[in-house]
Image: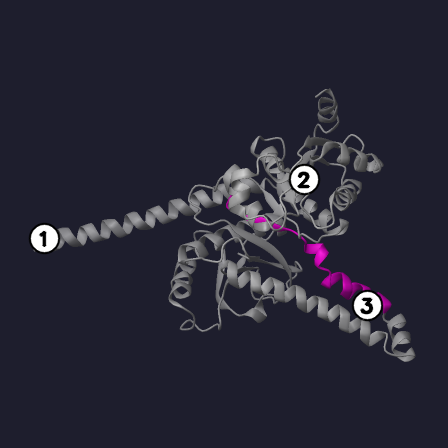
């Protein structure tokens, strides 16, 4: 305890990020390397690291930049990628994932980062942090490389829940605009609803209903609704926020990752085909490095769980140190912006708007009934 008190003094004034050290495919060494990269770039960040304390202390001791910037929470159990969310909710109290979320719940950290099992992380996040009042289904929002000036679009949901009705899609639009405002400084984001075409008559009944709902809230919620968008618009410049259900979003993101990997492999093969192509690669080295950086999924590693009483960032399970650092940077930036509080206010205002609409509908129905009775 005395050691933790000493760390608390050194971390005074820093934004503290709670990190699950044990969830990733590559083990805690990669996670520690990732937070060391973040610490090296940002003097205003500190960490609470969760996992077997003796093992983590040995790894942290090798990173001089982490000296005095890491507190430890001993957690001996690990949530594996094969564990079912229901089992973790019942038996996960001694795990590093549970402990990492608990630090946010207790107010010790401004956000949590984990490379672990997505379903288990979402289940535990809802159990420990609870959903914001008015949120039916939380969503996972990710950054997608795009042609927009900011370089990225936000898409949600990408896998928190495969289902989403019209009200859920409206909630995703409102939460997505709040995320874009705080992560990209865009005052009036443009929102698109993913569909099989841009024509208003296309799509199922829920999408058509969601189209009308989102359009009706755009002015009061200070965003521009561009209507239906297609898959080709996800990396485009017609919208800043792409709204969809978790099933479609997850298929899209996995397809995007696979396509980016194919492009990198094809380029490498093309430029190593012959002596002339290798020479051409040397001439184009600067441009190729820029392209490789643009397509590097590690730069945008980190899906944010939206709709909870706290900030949780899900890092890719196979992330390397660069990927972990990117996820930590995202959690830090959102904490800097006071994102959790702003999102809560946004959701509360949307609930108020919904209640006003329901009240107006009820009043109109009552007036009609009274008039009919009088007649």
Please tell me which of labels 2 and 3 falls first in the chain: 2
Asked if 249 appears above or below 266 in the picture, the reply is above
- Quadrant into which the C terminus falls: bottom left
Identify which residue is drawn at 78% across, 72% down. 267
Q: Which residue is mark 1?
A: 373
- Crowd rating for badge 2 (residues with CA inside 10 Å; few <14, some 14–19, many 20+): many
How far across and down, in percent of the image, does residue 125 sit?
54, 42
Q: Residue furthest left?
A: 375
> In the rendered structure, does residue 291 fall within the stretch colored magenta?
yes
Q: Which residue is mark 2?
A: 19
Image side of residue 27 versus residue 305, left or right: right
- Quadrant into which the N terminus falls: top right
Find out whether the residues at labels 1 and 3 contact each other: C-beta distance under 8 Å: no
Identify which residue is drawn at 84% across, 37% down. 62
Distance from Cα at disc 2 to Cα at disc 1: 64 Å
Q: Quadrant of residue 249?
A: bottom right
């Amino acid at each position: 305890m005395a050691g933790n008190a000493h760390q608390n003094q050194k971390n005074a004034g820093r934004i503290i990020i709670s990190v699950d050290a044990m969830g990733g495919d590559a083990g805690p060494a990669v996670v520690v390397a990732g937070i060391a990269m973040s610490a090296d770039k940002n003097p205003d960040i500190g960490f609470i690291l969760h996992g077997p304390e003796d093992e983590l202390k040995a790894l942290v001791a090798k990173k001089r930049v982490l000296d005095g910037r890491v507190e430890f929470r001993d957690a001996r159990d690990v949530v594996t990628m094969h564990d079912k969310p229901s089992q973790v909710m019942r038996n996960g109290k001694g795990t590093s994932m549970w402990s990492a979320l608990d630090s946010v719940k207790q107010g010790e950290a401004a956000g949590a980062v984990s490379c672990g099992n997505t379903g288990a992380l979402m289940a535990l996040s809802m159990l420990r942090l609870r959903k914001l009042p008015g949120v039916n289904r939380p969503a996972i929002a990710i950054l997608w490389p795009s042609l927009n000036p900011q370089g990225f679009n936000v898409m949600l949901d990408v896998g928190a829940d495969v289902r989403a009705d019209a009200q859920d899609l409206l909630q995703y639009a409102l939460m997505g605009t709040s995320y874009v405002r705080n992560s990209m400084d865009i005052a009036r984001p443009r929102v698109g609803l993913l569909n099989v075409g841009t024509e208003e008559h296309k799509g199922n009944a829920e999408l058509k209903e969601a189209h009308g709902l989102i359009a009706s809230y755009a002015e009061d919620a200070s965003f521009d609704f561009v209507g239906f968008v297609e898959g080709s618009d996800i990396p485009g410049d017609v919208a800043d926020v792409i709204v969809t259900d978790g099933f479609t979003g997850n298929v899209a993101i996995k397809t995007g990752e696979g396509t980016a990997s194919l492009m990198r492999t094809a380029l490498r093969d093309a430029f190593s085909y012959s002596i002339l192509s290798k020479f051409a690669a040397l001439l184009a080295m600067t441009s190729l490095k820029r392209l490789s950086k643009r397509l590097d999924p590690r730069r945008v590693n980190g899906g944010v769980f939206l709709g909870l009483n706290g900030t949780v960032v899900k890092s890719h399970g196979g992330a390397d140190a660069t990927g972990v650092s990117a996820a930590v940077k995202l959690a830090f930036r959102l904490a800097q912006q006071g994102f959790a509080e702003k999102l809560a206010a946004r959701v509360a205002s949307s609930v108020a708007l919904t209640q006003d609409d329901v009240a107006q509908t009820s009043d109109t129905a009552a007036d009609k009934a009274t008039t009919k009775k009088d007649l």
